[in-house]
Amino acid sequence: MNQPAENHPGQPGQQGPSGTSGQPGQGSASLAQSSPTVGTFRERDGALEWSGRQETVRIEPWGPDAVRVRARLGGPVLEGLPGALLDEAPPTEASVKIEDGRGQLTVGALTVEVDAEGLVRFLRTDDSAELLTEERAHFWWPGPRLYTPVGNGHHRLEQRFAAYEGEKLYGLGQHQHGLLDQKGAVLDLVQRNAEVTIPVLTSSRGYTLLWNSPAIGRVELAGNGTRWVADSARQIDYWITAGQPADAQRRYSAVTGRTPMLPEWAAGFWQCKLRYRTQDELLGVAREYKRRGLPIDAIVCDFFHWTHLGEWKFDPAEWPDPAAMQRELTELGIKLVVSVWPSVSPLSENHQLMEQRGYFIGTQYGPMAHADWPDKEVASTVQVAFYDATNPEARDFMWSRIKENYLDPYGITAFWLDACEPELKPGFQENLRYWAGPGLEVGNMYPSENARTFYEGMIAAGETEIVTLNRSAWAGSQRYGAALWSGDIGTDFATLRRQIAAGLNTSLSGIPWWNTDIGGFHGGDPDDPAYREVMIRWFQFGALSPLMRLHGFRDPGMPLGPDMTGGPNEVWSYGEEAGTIMEKYLRLRERLKPYVLDVMRAAHEEGLPVMRPLFLEFPDDQATWSVADSYLFGPDLLVAPVLTAGASVRTAYLPAGARWTDAWTGTSYEGGTNVTVDAPLDRIPLFLRDGAALPIAG
């Protein structure tokens, strides 16, 4: 018997590879398999369900132009599993049609077709162009969804989709590979320092897809297909919407939660270093900024300020009067941000109680210790545990300690949630047992739940301005007021270049509050002219980032431990020339604060990011989809950071459809072309859109 001809993927409007060009009749199926499945359809509560060979696929409206797809082997789909979607979907009009052995669900701009064999295909409603289709791994077996049992009702899950020539793919959280378009990449779905998993993907074909699973796994964006993998979970679950990237951001943020409004202080300059060891040292820096008349809105008290790890309170030997410190900082107009780690030393006064009550992440094998870490009063490291942020009672206990030791006595309301991946050593999630489920099934949600601890605690305490600075995040972290920074990264131009793509992909992953350690983290000699150039260029980029925060472990460093500190890291630490330029950009940030807050309000109200790839505003200009070295800061300001040593000019692409004005010189350019402009050491190229009036030059 001749096999049916295979259709190959193409751009929207062309048929995909799934054999969907034929229209099987009632109950018919492809003869490519020896024993084809002919499933059954039903409409249930406005959703379309297909069942066949013990598998159930449920497709339901989930907001305008969007659906949620769940698939499970061995029974109906399960409710209440951990995920990023809010409990209630935004109401929307939808229609279900079942005829000729096929099912169809239409939700605004998105239409979903399911054939007799359960193959799912997503189309644009207006012209029936294919956006995405499932694809079989093989005409015989397996199909597009594969369930490999791993025991106790869990499976290794695979979801396959077609690949399309010319497709570009963005999002997926924050990574250090330097790629804006991630087509061709293979990414682990796991949380690590500087590698942040947020499994939402935006395509140049006009769809955005959220893999709504916190399971450890990977996504493969290959030339012969896309494959999502969960190493151990109970069902496939994803959400997809049709539309241009800006519309998709609005839809995605509506179903995963929008960020609160950023407080005014957080839009300014944050001063930080590893680390200010004492109250006097921190206050001395704050006073010096004010003495010099330099803008500063926040200063950070880093780790080891505590008595023991997991006691979450100031060590009186180094911080003898936090109340007086807080009063003085408040009078100076400076917000104090305090580092809080989720790890608990066995020397902590809280360890025994937390262990007995089951507030720690458990293990499948061995003791409840997940990392080794230095602590005070011991000469070596100790084995620390992590509180289980997925456990509501553990969250309540954790917050009770924070409230008692920081909020109530001193009015401290801003927290730096470091090491919140959590920072496991070694990082074997398969050995972990969370309240919410096994480590392999739920491990990626930890940073979001950790941010939730502080958000819900602050809300209950009557606080309305909530910001936490997080080293990791997951889908939905933004709804808990979580800002993300790009982790412990290098201190050279190559690393700086990679931060542009990292920030843009983070923005497309629903996290509008993002920043880097200005100057990078690991080292950097303030007396080295080469590093001073890196710092200047990074400082310029930082001033035009969603959040502006100077941090790092500068040379000369010290070994990891309670007494450690790094070299100086204030704007006057880098010599007169560098200091003068950095002061210039501190003042620029101060002038731009009203604009920053306007753009932050758009993030809060609409879900639009602050740091925007050019194609978000100019999707019809095909050239913008490949620009990875510049970005829009809000709708009106194009930023082209200088990313190479010794550069004094910069070439930047200006999108078609607007007229652009060099913010420094006033020269005007028609969009749709590359322009080369001067970029001396004290200048980052900036372009204003269509006559926008922003106070760049003062």
Image: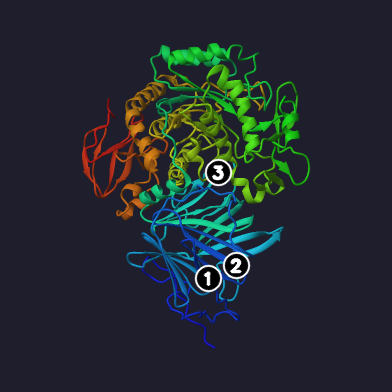
What's the CA distance linking mark 2 and mark 1? 9 Å
Q: Amino acid at mark 2?
A: Glu
Instruction: Write down the residue under mark 3.
Output: 195
Instruction: Write down the residue under mark 1.
Output: 118
| Number of the front mark, 3 or 2 | 2
Q: Residues within 10 Å of mark 1 (few under 14, many from 20)?
A: many
Q: Position of residue 408 (x, y in %)?
A: 57, 20
Query: Above or below — where is 481 with respect to 608?
Result: above
Mark toward the start of the polypeptide (2 vs 1): 2
Q: Position of residue 207 (x, y in %)?
A: 41, 57
Query: Above or below — where is 257 with respect to 136?
Result: above
Which color scheme did the rendering employ for the protein? Answer: rainbow
Q: Residues within 10 Å of mark 3 (few under 14, many from 20)?
A: many
Q: What mark, if any, has residue 55 been given in the picture?
A: 2
Residue closer to the observer: 575 or 257: 257
- In screen coordinates, is 391 left or right of 583? right
Query: How many discs appear?
Result: 3
Give the secondary structure at mark 2. strand
Asked whether the residues under the numbered discs 2 and 1 touch, taking CB atoms below 8 Å apart as contact, a structural biologist would say yes
